[in-house]
Image: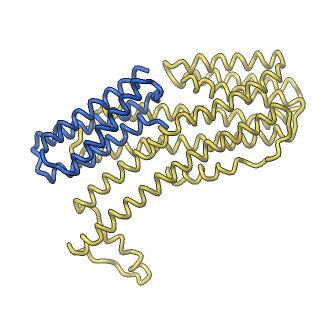
Chain colours: A yellow, B blue
């Protein structure tokens, strides 16, 4: 949770840093805002897809309980639900980070310092309101402090301090993801392995219609298969089980690649912000390339 | 890496896959109930561990992960070369107990 505090704190500092650049706004700062917004959106999509996979896993446990008799009580259900809730907190924080980063463009276009201060104060208030999200954890206190810090920095015009903090904070965001990545991969893998296990049991129990697998042969001729004979069912069952195994392995690999790509995007973003914070030119203006892989996985997973 | 979460994930799927094997080997209803309870416990241990990301550098956690991996290797071999269902259930119960200790470390940290 300490890292989460850093994460939220990062959102605050990003806006502080970028909004304070408003008076000497550069193309690099505008580009950084756009890239940071895209990266935060990718992060949010990743967490949404991961949370969705936990929801599906819970549904699979229910099916498994009905089918195999493995107990799945309300108390048992609470455990994956708690994990899902933690993932959603991270998604909400990614959303806040994205909202705040995208606000930078509006701030940077403002010529009046008063407008900048008003907008930044509104963002500070938004952070303070995030307090209500994760009940009972140390996070709310951190968010409140971050909101107050925002106000102070605006009043004191501590640009350099904000820039350094921003630089460090983006490293912390990457560290948070890196530390938890093996668990994210495990959660996604568990979903796919559980689906595969239930599908395998249903296939072995002749609980699926294997004739659908004949579609590639019959569709071009507008033909419909008759219900499979036992012999045909047995033959297709072997093929179905083999496809199940292969598809699960590919899906597991795809998720692992997506989480690695997300981490790469976060690190790349951090490097670019470091250049900005140290007043060096930012040679690459486009979004981190690896984000496409994350978006593609999230779209297919949800 | 996070070997503690991964070990608990693997334990759950090893036990879950063993259900059909033990049914085929003629396990009694009581034995199957014990196995199903152990599978549910193993699943709970896994989710407890994910909820609190564990500190794998903790020496106790390291030791438990190591024990769990050794027991699971032996358990996997026992299930594959099944002789006595009661012995397998006993081994499964012991393996799940180690998993519970590991999950408890996660809660405590």
Does residue A170 appear left or right of residue A300 in this picture? right
The residue sitting at 79% across, 21% down in the picture is A161
Residue A173 lies, with reference to residue A233, above or below; the image says above
Residue A169 % position (x, y): 68, 28
Where in the figure is residue B29, as x and y percent of width and height? Answer: 11, 43
**Along the line of sight, the residue nearer the viewer: A59 or A192:** A192
Q: Nearer the viewer, residue A276 or A128?
A: A276
State the quadrant of the N terminus of chain A.
top right
Question: Residue at point 33% right, 32% down?
Answer: B67
Q: Residue at x 55, y 22 (%)?
A: A132
Among the 4 quarters of the image, the one containing residue A241: bottom left
Q: State the residue lying farthest toward the bottom.
A: A221
Left or right: residue A196 versus residue A157 is left
In the image, what residue occupies the spot 41% across and 61% down? A246
x, y percent for residue A99: 68, 35
A301 in relation to A162, above or below: below
């Amino acid at each position: 949770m300490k890292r989460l505090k850093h994460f939220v704190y990062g959102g605050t500092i990003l806006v502080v840093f970028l909004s304070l650049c408003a008076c000497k706004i550069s193309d690099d700062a505008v580009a950084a805002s756009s890239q940071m917004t895209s990266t935060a959106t990718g992060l949010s999509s990743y967490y949404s897809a991961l949370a969705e996979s936990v929801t599906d896993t819970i549904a699979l446990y229910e099916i498994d309980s009905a089918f195999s008799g493995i107990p799945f009580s309300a108390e048992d259900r609470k455990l994956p639900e708690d994990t899902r809730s933690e993932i959603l907190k991270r998604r909400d924080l990614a959303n806040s980070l994205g909202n705040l980063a995208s606000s930078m463009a509006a701030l940077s276009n403002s010529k009046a310092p008063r407008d900048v201060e008003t907008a930044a104060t509104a963002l500070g208030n938004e952070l303070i309101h995030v307090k209500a999200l994760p009940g009972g954890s140390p996070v709310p206190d951190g968010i409140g402090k971050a909101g107050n810090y925002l106000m102070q920095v605006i009043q004191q015009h501590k640009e350099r301090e904000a820039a350094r903090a921003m630089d460090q904070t983006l490293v912390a965001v990457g560290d948070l993801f890196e530390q938890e990545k093996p668990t994210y991969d495990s959660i996604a893998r568990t979903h796919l392995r559980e689906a595969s296990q239930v599908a395998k049991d249903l296939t072995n129990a002749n609980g699926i219609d294997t004739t659908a697998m004949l579609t590639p042969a019959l569709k071009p001729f507008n033909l419909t298969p008759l219900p499979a004979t036992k012999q045909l069912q047995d033959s297709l069952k072997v093929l179905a089980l083999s496809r199940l195994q292969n598809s699960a392995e590919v899906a597991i690999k795809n998720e692992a690649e997506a989480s690695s790509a997300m981490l790469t995007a976060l690190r790349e973003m951090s490097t670019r912000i470091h250049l900005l914070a140290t007043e060096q030119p930012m040679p690459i203006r486009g979004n981190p390339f690896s984000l496409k892989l994350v978006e593609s996985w999230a779209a297919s997973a949800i | 890496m996070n070997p503690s979460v991964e070990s608990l994930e693997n334990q759950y799927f090893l036990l879950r896959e063993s259900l059909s094997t033990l049914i085929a080997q003629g396990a009694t209803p009581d034995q199957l109930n014990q196995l199903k309870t152990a599978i549910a416990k193993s699943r709970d241990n896994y989710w407890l561990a994910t909820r609190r990301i564990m500190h794998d550098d903790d020496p106790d956690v390291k030791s438990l992960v190591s024990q769990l991996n050794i027991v699971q290797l032996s358990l996997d071999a026992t299930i594959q070369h099944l002789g006595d269902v009661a012995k397998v259930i006993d081994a499964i119960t012991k393996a799940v107990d180690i998993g519970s200790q590991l999950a408890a470390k996660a809660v405590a940290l």
